[in-house]
Amino acid sequence: MGKYFDALNEDVRFIEGLKSCMNCGICTAICPAASFYNYDPRVVVNIVQSRDEEKIEELLKSETIWYCGQCLSCKTRCPRGNTPGYIIMALRTLSQKTGLFIYSEKGRQQLAIKRITGESILNIGYCVYPDLVKPEWHPEQGPAWEWVYKHREKIMSKFGANYKGKGPGALRKIDDKDLDELKEIFKVTGNLELFETIEEHSYVKAREMNLAIDETLDNEYIYHISNYNGNNHSKE
């Protein structure tokens, strides 16, 4: 075996996701992403099952592994009990660990996801919080959300949320001891190290692209990866 397949085979999601693919294509037929993107889960499974290191590396560098929406429709239909969605999860993690995610447009967006969602989980205990959905970052929400965002403290209380308050309730402030426990979980599972790896490789790519980058969300590189679209992802 090779280094990529060996690494994949250490991931429980890969072990559970790949049984014995016979290339019937049912996963592709049921896949919502495959009907829109240049994406074929059957091909992905075939490549990893072949154990061809060069082709697996191409996958890790590609846009392909970032198209899956993780709906797991594939799991419900496969006659052999495979779950291409799990295999995609393992491929994504390996792409991040090896730094190969920076070779693809969608892969580079992992830095924005890490800084917005990942750091939010660690800092406040929520992956999505009203404060994060800033109108300037989400113009698709329209003027109604802009008004809600501006008056969010008063509005959230009207919905019964305990917005940033102590005690129980939606949107409550998470206790520091719980946040410390959460950070320890991230540390033990290797996710803090993975976050650092994503940062390191992203800085390298930013310099390569001559784009300014710092630890905030307000820099050229973050803006570029969040907004640029090569328009080569969907089917003709």
Image (cartoon, helix red, strand yellow):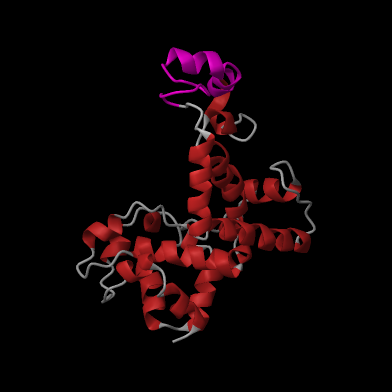
Residue sitting farthest toward the left:
79
Residue shown at the point (23%, 57%) measured from the top left: 76
* Residue 127 visible in the displayed image: no
- Residue 86 lies in quadrant: bottom left
Residue 111 lies in the magenta stretch: no
Residue shown at the point (55%, 43%) measured from the top left: 122
Residue 160 lies in the magenta stretch: yes
| Residue 171 position within the rendered picture, expressed as x and y whole percent measured from the top left | 47, 27
- Residue 5 lies in quadrant: bottom left
> Which quarter of the rendered picture does the N terminus lie within?
bottom left
| Residue 46 position within the rendered picture, expressed as x and y whole percent measured from the top left | 36, 76
State left or right for residue 100 relative to residue 156: right
Measured along the vertical axis of the image, is residue 184 above or below residue 7?
above
State left or right for residue 116 relative to residue 27: right
Measured along the vertical axis of the image, is residue 26 above or below residue 58?
above
Residue shown at the point (34%, 65%) measured from the top left: 84
Residue sitting farthest toward the bottom:
1
Q: How many labels sit on residues? A: 0
- Residue 142 lies in quadrant: top right
* Residue 131 visible in the displayed image: yes
- Along the viewing direction, whichever of 126 and 149 lies nearer the viewer: 126
| Residue 101 position within the rendered picture, expressed as x and y whole percent measured from the top left | 58, 64
Residue shown at the point (36%, 65%) measured from the top left: 13
Measured along the vertical axis of the image, is residue 168 above or below residue 186?
above
- Along the viewing direction, whichever of 35 and 152 lies nearer the viewer: 152
Q: Which residues are magenta?
A: 144-170
- Along the viewing direction, whichever of 134 and 46 lies nearer the viewer: 134
State left or right for residue 92 relative to residue 225: left
| Residue 90 position within the rendered picture, expressed as x and y whole percent measured from the top left | 43, 65
